[in-house]
Amino acid sequence: MGLKSILVILVVLFSLLQYRLWFGTGGLLRLWQINQSVAAQKLENSKLQERNLALEAEVIDLKRGLGAVEERARSELGMIKEGETFVQVVPPSKAVK
């Protein structure tokens, strides 16, 4: 066995090890994909946490008093109190020539 054949065997082994390092089951490419997935999930979790805090604050408002319930009924359902007069201002339309 000559020096040339030993060198070829070492190059082939090195190439196989490099392939496994980059593209194998636990390789660097898979690690990068997992890191990207974790970063995306953390962003989604952060958005959901903010939404949950807003909903929690709204629940507390609704439990504490009727002001929040009344405000919601007015804005979302268009309700008015008894004895109030509803006034709707309609912007003037442009005259048709």
Image (spheres, rainbow, N blue to C red):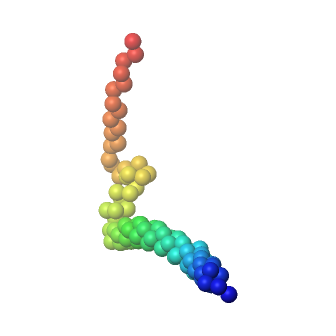
The residue nearer to you, when weighing 65 against 48, is 48
Q: Does residue 28 appear left or right of residue 3 in this picture?
A: left
The residue nearer to you, when weighing 94 against 43, is 43
Q: Residue furthest front?
A: 2
Spot occupied by residue 97 in the image (x, y as percentages of width and height)? 39, 12
Q: Does residue 43 appear left or right of residue 66 in this picture?
A: right
Residue at (40, 70) in percent of width and height: 46
Residue at (35, 69) in percent of width and height: 57
Q: Residue furthest bottom?
A: 1
Q: Residue furthest top?
A: 97
Asked if residue 95 can be seen in this view, the reply is yes
Quadrant in which residue 7 is drawn: bottom right
Asked if residue 48 can be seen in this view, the reply is no
Quadrant in which residue 27 is drawn: bottom right
Residue at (31, 62) in percent of width and height: 67
Spot occupied by residue 5 in the image (x, y as percentages of width and height)? 65, 82
Residue at (45, 71) in percent of width and height: 39
The residue nearer to you, when weighing 11 against 60, is 11
Spot occupied by residue 1 in the image (x, y as percentages of width and height)? 68, 87
| Numbered label tally | 0
Spot occupied by residue 40 in the image (x, y as percentages of width and height)? 47, 68
